[in-house]
C-alpha cells in the first residue's frame, strides 16, 4: 500500500490504521521530515513491512521513483490512497489568480493522476487492487473563499468516477471519500467564528477525528467493499444531508 501525503494529519492516521489492520505501508511525505519519521515509527511498530519515502507527487520523476521503491520494498502494490494535497488559504474569487488555482490542481488532481498512472501496471497484478481518493464535503456545499480548492476536488471526484469505469475490466476498484470538517492543522488557519458556525451546522455538533476518516477509508479498500466502485462516500457528520434537506425546504 502507498499512502501519499501521509507524514502527518489525516494521511498519517490512514497509514497507521492500515498498518494496524495488517497492510504493508509506504509512508510518503514532502516536507516536515520529523513528523514523517514519527509516523513511520508508529507504522513500523505493528511489525509489517513498511517504507518511508520523500517524494513530490506533483512531479512525474518523483512519482515513478516512489512507486518503484514501494513495489521493491513491499513486494507489490495492491492499494493506492491519493491523499496528498497542497495547503491552501481561503481567498475570494476577486483576489484569486490562475496560478493559485493551478497550484491546487497540481497538488490534488495532477498528483492523483500521476500516482495512479505509475501504479497501474502493479495494481493490475495485485490482489483485490483498489484506488482511494480523498475529496471534500465542500465540493457539493461550497464555502466563500474555497473556490480554488473545491474546483480541484471536484475534478478529483470526476476522475474517480471515470477511472472506476475504465479500470473495472482490470478488477481495480476506484472510490473516494468526501471528508467533512476534521481536526487537523488546516482548521487552525480558519477564523474562530467561522469554525463555531460550521460546527453548529453539523448534525453531530463536532468535527471529525482523523481516526474516524481512517476507519471509513479502511472499509473502502477492504474486501468487504468488493462490490463498491465509483462511489463518493460522505464522512461528514451528516452535514451534507442536513444542507440538502435545508435547501430542499427553500431555506
Image (cartoon, grey):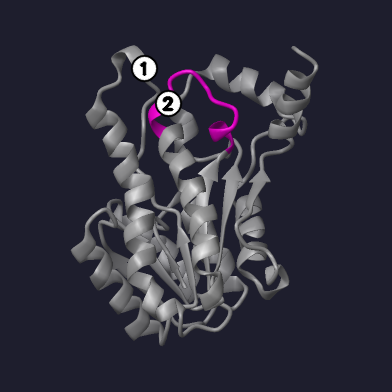
Q: Position of residue 49 (x, y in %)?
A: 45, 82
Residue located at (26% from left, 61% from top): 55
Q: Secondary structure at mark 1?
A: helix
Task: Let me know if residue 75 is in the magenta part.
Answer: no
Circles 1 and 2 in contact, beta carbons < 8 Å: yes
Residue 47 seen: yes
Q: Secondary structure at mark 2?
A: helix
Q: Position of residue 152 (x, y in %)?
A: 41, 39
Taking depth in this image into account, of 18 and 105 the one nearest to the observer is 105
Task: Let me know if residue 145 is in the magenta part.
Answer: yes
Number of callouts in the render? 2
Q: Earlier in the sequence, mark 1 or mark 2?
A: 1
Q: Is residue 240 left or right of residue 159?
A: right
Residue located at (62% from left, 53% from top): 211
Q: CA distance from mark 1 to mark 2?
A: 7 Å
Taking depth in this image into account, of 110 and 14 the one nearest to the observer is 110
Q: Position of residue 62 (x, y in %)?
A: 22, 64
Residue located at (55% from left, 62% from top): 165
Residue located at (42% from left, 84% from top): 76
Residue for badge 2: 147
Q: Position of residue 48 (x, y in %)?
A: 50, 82
In the rendered image, the residue lying farthest to the left is 61
**Residue 115 sits above or below residue 226 on the image:** above
**Residue 126 sits above or below residue 147 on the image:** below
Q: Is residue 123 left or right of residue 180?
A: left
Residue for badge 1: 93
Which corner quadrant holds the C terminus?
top right
Number of other residues with Cα within 10 Å of mark 1, as a class: few under 14, some 14 to 19, many 20 or more: few
Quadrant hosting residue 61:
bottom left
Q: Which of the numbered marks, if any, corresponds to residue 73?
A: none
Residue 37 seen: no
Q: Which residues are magenta?
A: 137-149
Amino acid at each position: 500500500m502507498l499512502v501519499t501525503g501521509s507524514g502527518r494529519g489525516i494521511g498519517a492516521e490512514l497509514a497507521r490504521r492500515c498498518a494496524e489492520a495488517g497492510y504493508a505501508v509506504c509512508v510518503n511525505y514532502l516536507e516536515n521530515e520529523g513528523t514523517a519519521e514519527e509516523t513511520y515509527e508508529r507504522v513500523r511498530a505493528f511489525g509489517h513491512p513498511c517504507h518511508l519515502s520523500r517524494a513530490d507527487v506533483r512531479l512525474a520523476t518523483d512519482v515513478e521513483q516512489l512507486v518503484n521503491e514501494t513495489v521493491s520494498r513491499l513486494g507489490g502494490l495492491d492499494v493506492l490512497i491519493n491523499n496528498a494535497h497542497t495547503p491552501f488559504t481561503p481567498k475570494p474569487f476577486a483576489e484569486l489568480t490562475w496560478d493559485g488555482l493551478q497550484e491546487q490542481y497540481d497538488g490534488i488532481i495532477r498528483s492523483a493522476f500521476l500516482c495512479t498512472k505509475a501504479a497501474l501496471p502493479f495494481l493490475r497484478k495485485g490482489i483485490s487492487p483498489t484506488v482511494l481518493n480523498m475529496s471534500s464535503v465542500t465540493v457539493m456545499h461550497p464555502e466563500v473563499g474555497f473556490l480554488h480548492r473545491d474546483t480541484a476536488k471536484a475534478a478529483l471526484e470526476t476522475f474517480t468516477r471515470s477511472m472506476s469505469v475504465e479500470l473495472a475490466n482490470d478488477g481495480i476498484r476506484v472510490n473516494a471519500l468526501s471528508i467533512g470538517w476534521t481536526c487537523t492543522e488546516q482548521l487552525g488557519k480558519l477564523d474562530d467564528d467561522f469554525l463555531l458556525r460550521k460546527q453548529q451546522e453539523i448534525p453531530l455538533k463536532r468535527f471529525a477525528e482523523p481516526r474516524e476518516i481512517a476507519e471509513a477509508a479502511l472499509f473502502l479498500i477492504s474486501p468487504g467493499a468488493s462490490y463498491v466502485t465509483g462511489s463518493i462516500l460522505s464522512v461528514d457528520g451528516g452535514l451534507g444531508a442536513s444542507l440538502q434537506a435545508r435547501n430542499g425546504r427553500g431555506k
